[in-house]
Amino acid sequence: MATKQVEGLHCLGQGAYAWLAPEPGWGWSNAGLIADGDASLLVDTLFDLSLTDRMLRTMRDAEPRAKSIGTLVNTHANGDHCHGNELIVGADIIASSASAAEMSELPPEAMAALVEAAHDLGPVGEYFLHCFGQFTFSGITHTPPTRTFDGELELQVGDKPIHLIEVGPAHTRGDVLVYSPRDKVVFTGDILFIEGTPIMWQGPVGNWIKACELIEDMDVDLIVPGHGPVTDKHGVHAVKHYLQFVHEQARQRYDAGLSALEAARDIELAEYSAWSDPERIAVNVDSLYREFSASDQATDIFELFARMAELAGFTAKRE
């Protein structure tokens, strides 16, 4: 099950909500709210202050307990899940230790500078603006977690137990699932992209596949991905299958001596070509090649965006 993507707040049951973005593409992320008794917990903020403010206003209109959010959990370090943190005044902000460290590496002011510079970068800049130009990064104050953990952390929201489970490194270095067993809901952050192509900035792919299997084993009815519509375990299976497929295809081409870019060009995505942003295959293959070669040398981010720009048709094919 993948419900139609309808922007806005969706009630998932008694005191559980999903905030869905209007589309599954770059930067358009989901969030969540869990409330019980006099307490409430927010799962992620959004990419800029305007988007986050709109979400919070809607939540507070629908759920009185959201007027004073006591806890914010950032599922990972990408800005579209934490740039709005400053608007959750007085909350305990929780993330994994790895995510907290990673958040400081690309703060909002750095994204603002990249967007400004992109206007002079030709086709790669055009692609970057296609991905991020509709968001406003100026004026955001980087607001890091106030509390970190490793492994698992048990929280309480009213009478609801909440389990935070670190499953990274996978999409990023410190991905976290937020599981509410009483609501039979799990918020996955970017472990799940539904109807959109997952992007593996970190890996290893085995950790990501294990995270999907962990979700498949949970007693949940509804699954809120980081991007795309609310889903069930069929959606989890589709993401897992994509990761297994890309791993197999990349391995064949690595063994045949193709470069990571050649492999990304060569892989026929078949059923996955209909997912949004299929050019992310370039990043996924690059991460897998690092894994195959046991290299800890990350490819320059501008080079990765150049590869994606090419595959998306924003630049002439390179040799």
Image: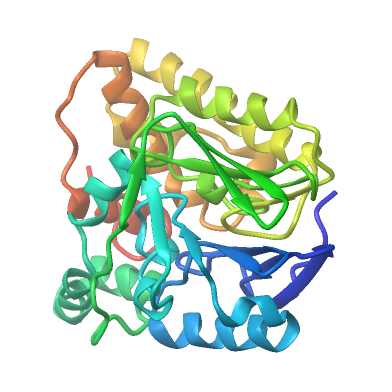
Residue 77 position in % (x across, y down): 35, 53
Q: Is residue 186 above or below residue 123?
A: above
Residue positioned 32% across, 15% down in the render: 292
Q: Quadrant of residue 139?
A: bottom left
Considering the image in quadrants, where does the C terminus appear?
Answer: top left
User: What colouring style does the render use?
Assistant: rainbow
Residue 17 position in % (x across, y down): 72, 66
Q: Which of the two residues, 22 or 68, is positioned nearer the viewer here? A: 68
Q: Which of the two residues, 90 or 242, is positioned nearer the viewer here? A: 90
Q: Is residue 145 visible?
A: yes
Residue positioned 66% across, 24% down in the render: 213
Q: Quadrant of residue 30?
A: bottom right
Q: Is residue 187 above or below residue 246?
A: below
64 left or right of 121 in image? right
Residue 284 position in % (x across, y down): 41, 37
63 left or right of 150 in image? right
Residue positioned 24% across, 78% down in the render: 141
The furthest residue to the top: 255
Q: Is residue 7 visible?
A: no
Looking at the rendered structure, the number of numbered marks drawn on it comes to: 0
